[in-house]
């Protein structure tokens, strides 16, 4: 967030991730400004942003799951955001052990 006030979507993303995954660490970055001319943004009518995010989630909930399974779980948890204009989400999903460099 870099000292900025979170947007409405960012707050909803944070709430959903916290509810579903009880993360040890959660970093959300709005990358929408970097994609302002992107066709998906123009088509969605969301010229004001809140369409592209990068997220780092560290949670024990990912233990024993592969990369695709983890991603599917996060996408399911954020389904309503995708249906309401979230266009792209870059995910880094780790267990606490992976985040600490322990395998």
Image (cartoon, helix red, strand yellow):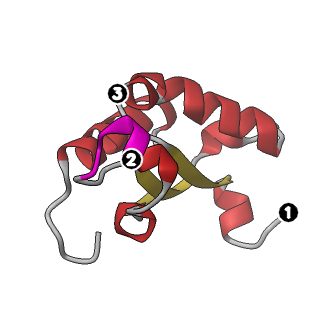
59 versus 78 height, above or below? below
- Locate residue 73: give its quadrant: top right
- Residue 12: image location, x then y, percent: 28, 37
Q: Give the range drawn in magenta.
A: 42-47
Residue beneath the point at 50% across and 56% down: 55
Q: Which residue was labeled with disc 3?
A: 84
In terms of secondary structure, where does tag 2 sit? helix
Specify the farthest residue to the bottom.
Answer: 2
**Label 1: few (<14), some or many (≥20) within 10 Å?**
few
Front residue of 7/3: it is 7
Which of pointers 3 and 2 lies earlier in the amino acid sequence? 2
Residue 22 in sight in this render: yes
- Locate residue 75: give its quadrant: top right
- Residue 84: image location, x then y, percent: 34, 27
Residue 94 placement, left or right of 32: right
**Label 3: few (<14), some or many (≥20) within 10 Å?**
few
Q: Is residue 2 magenta?
A: no
**Label 2: few (<14), some or many (≥20) within 10 Å?**
few
Q: Which residue was labeled with disc 2?
A: 42
Q: Which residue was labeled with disc 1?
A: 103
């Amino acid at each position: 967030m870099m000292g900025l006030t979170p947007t409405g979507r960012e707050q909803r993303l944070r709430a959903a991730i916290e509810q579903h995954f009880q993360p040890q660490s959660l970093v959300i970055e709005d990358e929408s400004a970097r994609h302002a001319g992107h066709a998906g943004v123009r088509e969605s009518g969301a010229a004001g942003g809140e369409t592209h995010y990068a997220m780092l989630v560290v949670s024990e909930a990912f233990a024993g799951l592969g990369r695709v399974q983890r991603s599917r779980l996060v996408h399911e948890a954020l389904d309503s955001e995708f249906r309401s204009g979230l266009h792209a989400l870059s995910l880094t999903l780790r267990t606490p052990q992976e985040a600490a460099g322990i395998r």
